[in-house]
Amino acid sequence: ITASPVFPEGFLWGGATAANQVEGAYIEGGKGLSIQDVMPNGILTPRADAPTDDNLKQVAIDFYHRYAEDIALFAEMGFGVYRFSIAWSRIFPQGDESEPNEEGLAFYDRVLDELERHGIQPLVTISHYETPLHLAEQYDGWASRELIGFYERYVRTLFTRYGARVKYWLTFNEINSVLHAPFMSGGINTPKDQLSRTDLYQAVHHELVASALATKIARELAPDAQIGCMVLSMPVYPLTPDPDDVFAALTTDRTNLAFGDIHVRGEYPGYYLRSLREQGVELAITDEDRGLLKENTVDFVSFSYYSSICETVDPDKRDMGEGNLFGGVRNPTLKASEWGWQIDPVGLRLALNSFWDRWQKPLFIVENGLGAKDELVEVDGVPTVVDDYRIAYLQAHLEQVGEAIADGVDLLGYTTWGCIDLVSASTAQLSKRYGFIYVDRNDDGSGSLTRYRKKSFDWYAEVIRTNGASL
Ligand code: BG6
């Protein structure tokens, strides 16, 4: 018999969203355009030249006007933390202005007021796939070193304004994804197939330096703040016990682990430098960059977790599957979601253990969840979704989180992705739903935007109320 997992006192339970996927109001309140405004179809199709009306993110789920109602629902579930991002282009509409947009700043003051009223801690992502479009078009996004200065001005503004109210900050969402989705993740306008490896790794370097700079500025302006990096995690298993497969799995794993290593240790690891050399990449790194990285390491490491992948050196066995922004060799032992992402709860325990063993820094799971099609039905006359599949997914993952805590992992909290239905990042669909709260809006833009509690809403409320004992 397995006992119920024991979560530490003060464990932060909650949910996560990103501005561009929930707020809407895409040009209200002085907001400028972001790269998301020209990505009506997510990352799977080329970007548009200008905003198009078929972009669900223009309205998204209208959080900009409904945040009070939504935060009240989060409070009803007992959230202790809510992860959200600040839309850079609400604060600096073009990205390169010298003065911020007061209306944008005031909006997040109101969001923070509402969270405080309900005793919910904010966890703020500074940059979540929503670089101001002007920075993409004018400077080629993070491919340009100039972005560091614009980001610096932006984070100074945030820490000055909200530093006393926000303890937990994440510098870049899934910082490792620039290599895979350069426009969405790094605002890099040049099409991916025209970017060299040097271009991509140089952009990564700029973000890493900016991330360290944010930590430095926080130490000055918001001494109580805790700064974390945020990495897309995807544990890699060898497809077979062939030692070459085992090493290939380590090599692939390191393409993601490197980002944690650099944030925690403050320097590029040897295996990373070797890989750059072998790819013919020569980076422009200044002594000042090195100093910034070394002296401003993170307080904690946060990550998203949806699935694991396999690796093999045998070209005939490379059966590729889908995944969060990038996939990998399919695992023949696992089932997958409707979008082909393989489901692996034990992989989460593995990730937690290996990160803790490796970095000895507090961890925070800031995304996890199942994107699924939901059907709104009536139960006892009340509209709801009977989402037993979502409950099963989260239950299985949280049991493994409990195991990892029992293994000794220091974990600060857990925020499910898309605690309220939102627009998907990769496919820009609303029908790919993650929430405990159903939002009446469809892929064609129709719907009343009314919110309904799903079955998982009560389930999660009970998990939180019992601090995990109900699992
Ligand atoms: C992560 C992102 O990659 O995965 C989120 O940080 C995203 O923005 C989430 O929404 C789930 O991916 P998708 O494509 O199903 O929305």
Image: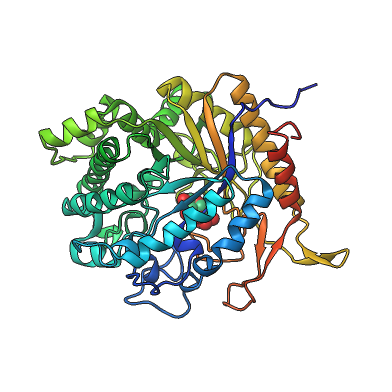
For image coordinates 41% across by 30% down, the residue present is 248
Looking at the picture, does residue 11 appear above or below residue 330?
A: above
> Is residue 34 something one can see in this rendering?
no
Q: Is residue 69 above or below residue 418?
A: below
Query: Based on the displayed image, in which of its 4 quarters is residue 294 positioned?
Result: top left
Coloring scheme of the render? rainbow
Residue 226 position, x and y percent, is 39, 35
Quadrant into which the C terminus falls:
top right
Choose between 192 and 62: the one closer to the eye: 62
> Residue 313, image x and y in percent?
43, 34
| In the image, farthest residue toward the right | 380
Residue 48, quarter of picture: bottom left
Q: Residue most toward the left?
A: 287
Determine the image quadrant of residue 171.
top left
Please determine whether, in this image, residue 406 is positioned above or below residue 133.
above
Q: Is residue 292 left or right of residue 452?
A: left
Assign the N terminus to one quadrant of the image.
Answer: top right
Q: Is residue 381 visible?
A: yes
Report x, y in % for residue 216.
25, 36
In front: 258, or 15?
15
Residue drawn at the location 32% of the way across and 39% of the way down: 222
Image spot of residue 7 (x, y percent): 64, 28
Q: State how many labels appear.
A: 0
Please state if 274 lies on the left or on the right of 115 as rendered: left
- Foreground residue among 48 and 119: 119
